[in-house]
Amino acid sequence: MMELMVQQNTQAPIYIYACLLKGCTRKKALAEGKRVHALIVQMGLDSNIFLGNTLINMYAKCGSVLDARQVFDSMPEHNVFSWTTIISAYANHGLGEEAIDLFQQMQQTSIPPNTVAFVVVLKACAGIPALEQGKQLHAEIMRRGFESDVTVGNTLVDMYAKCGCIEDARQVFNNMHIRNVVSWNVMIAGYAQHGLGKKALDLYEQMKKEGVQPSKVTYVVLLKACAGVAALEQGKQLHSDIIKIGFESEANVGSILVDMYAKCGHIEEARQVFNNMHERDVVSWTAMIAGYAQHGLGKEALDLYEQMKQEGVQPNIVTDVVLLKACASTAAVEQGKQIHADIIKSGYKPDVTVENTLVDMYAKCGCIEDARQVFNNMHERDVVSWNAMITGYAEHEFGKEALALYEQMKQEGLQADFVTYVVLLKACASTAALEQGKQLHEDIIKSGFSSDEIVGSTLVDMYAKCGCIEDARQVFNNMHERDVVSWTAMIAGYAQQGLSKEALKLLEQMEREGIKPNEVTYVSVLSAFSHSGLVDKGRQLFDSMCEDHAVTPIMDHYACMVDLLGRAGCLADAEDFISKMPIQPNAVVWMSLLSAARNHGHVEIGRRAFDSVVKLEPENAAAYVLLSDIYATAGRSDEVAKIRKEMNDAGVKKVPECSWIEVGNQVHAFVVGDATHPQSKEIRAELDRLVGLMKDAGYKYDLSFVLHDVEGEKKENALCEHSEMLAIAFGLISTPPGTPIRIKKNFRICRDCHDATKIISKLARREIAARDANRVHHFVDGFCSCGDYW
């Protein structure tokens, strides 16, 4: 209609153009707004200050700050509303620095800022945050006498709180002559945002005493505070107040109540609130689904999602992320794929958070190729995207791929964060990839993360697991701040090397420095005593932990004690210890006893331990192998055959033994009898050479643990082709003389390979560090650091 009027040269009143622009603003109709702008220009009204201000507002509200600025810059004159509107446009779009800069330009003009201008620019300061500029504005507000304005006061409280100055925020709040419900809400929210839940709740009580009626926002903020600190009782009291006031039927209040109960561990109460809600929106459904997911109830979360769809409620991005996390936690890949399909069908615009969660879900469900496909197809990738994919590779022991992706990440100019380094260091530790770990250490120093406690602790762990205990200690000593995790990592490092004296000494130093050991710390020290055969010291520490330090033993402590007694040959004591445990022993405890029975050839105890393991974990292949070894050592071939049959009938698959060695920044993996390596012939020739030298030196094979139906020379060949022997032989032919060799094995090194490696270290004049499932062995000149006790 307006375009028709213009074509007929009919002049419309200015307010008509303003009404059209406001309509476009309400509907976010940018294209129509531009058409109105064109008409204004065509009619020669673009110099009108009122229409100029309205155009700035329209463009800003429709998301086009650039167009808003162009209008502002083209205006022949400005008033206070012009400046306030353009400053607000920048502030509302997260461009706080530009908003502050514009306000400073305004101050250089003859137009004095009003209270609205100060409110807008204070919000910009809160969003950045820009504390110093906020303080300068506060001083200017005082000079102009605007501090008595309640909206200005509320915004000052909010600015100080969001800039981390909660005491300054409270001082402004206390000095306010007039306070409305918003004032109280802003101050309560400030406390809640800083984790000061108690102060937020105290202020709520003061608010009620002063006769101020709380609003829905008050309760939403307070319930979030209760959820953050798991303050269930206060949350219940708030729930009671909400019912009295009549806010329970409000969807947003109900959703926060669901979230509060779920985060306080009361999922049934959360569901009851959810069920009683008269109206449920997508936020309500998402809160309940998230509650289930947070408690590991993936099935319930997915069932609720199906109910949500049946009731016609469309999930949003948050719902999708929560559901995908539920699928990841329960390895529900089929449901995850269905949700992925639903997301695509909904015609969603690519969202980096959803895509990151998809990568994580597929990786955690073991579908590493699907994860990589999602990763490759992402239009935009942030550091979380790279971390999710790197973590997926690392957790599935694709260390090489994880490190290659890290190199690609660097080439694309993205800065790794501490999560990236922690994940990669763990990958290096898992495969004893020392050289790559050292390269990462250099990158960490360059990027400034070496002072991070978590990164430092992971570096300690990596060096220790690669057999470099001195390097681990150096990293530990150089840490500026050390928490219980750092100390425990170093103690665990000593434990893995069997250095019980050093572990105990460090525990005592830790206590002297006022760091309280946690459950994991005691597990590490008990493990060190176990590997050193210090039974009495282990018993004393266990008793002291319970009686003197009031630490309630967890399953790992009991498993360590069984391992300690079992390794020392005190199998009857170990079995008696299990019978007296105040909690039901798990499979790990019984496996410790079974392993000890295998090492000491105790058939009866071994059988009882085996029976207990398979009751708890019917598919535990290691239990079958250990019992088979016990029978083989005892010469009971019929029982060996019977165990094999039971294993096959139960469909239990043995996990292949595997050893890794790093040569030339590349990790090589070997399994028993491996002939797939490109240098297999050379490796075999080196083993034959070593066998000849070992025989000349008088070495005899210990064949007790070789399968009973393998005879003579075949037994010797079987032992020579163990994965650790292949890895060592490859290391000998691939590295210069005198270079230390470091390998890692996923199972315990057998006695024969252990004895053979001692001789090889002497014959080859090499230091050999071998980390098995129990500890790190250092072989030097015919001796092992474990003293043949492991």
Image (cartoon, helix red, strand yellow):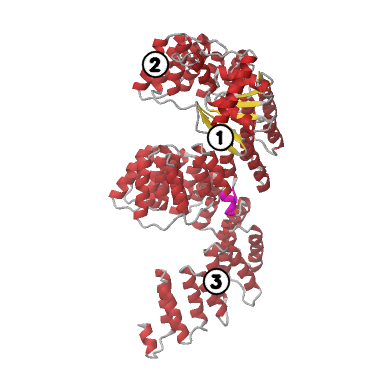
281 or 318: which is nearer to us?
Answer: 318
Percent position of residue 461, x then y: 61, 33
Q: Is 755 left, or right, of 204 in this rendering?
A: right
- Quadrant (top left, top right, bottom left, bottom right) of the C terminus: top right
Instruction: Give the structural element (helix, strand or loop) at label 1.
Output: strand
**Mark 3: amino acid:** Ile
Question: Which residue has dot 3 on it?
Answer: 86
User: How far separated are the C-alphas under marks 3 and 2?
Assistant: 81 Å
In the picture, the disc for residue 668 is: 1
Earlier-in-chain disc, 3 versus 1: 3
Question: Which residue has dot 2 on it?
Answer: 643
- Which stretch is magenta? 408-416
Q: Residue at x 57, y 54 (%)?
A: 412
**Mark 1: amino acid:** His
**Mark 2: amino acid:** Ile
Q: How many C-alpha atoms fall within 10 Å of the one at disc 2: few (<14), some, or many (≥20)?
A: some
Residue 174 counted in the magenta span: no
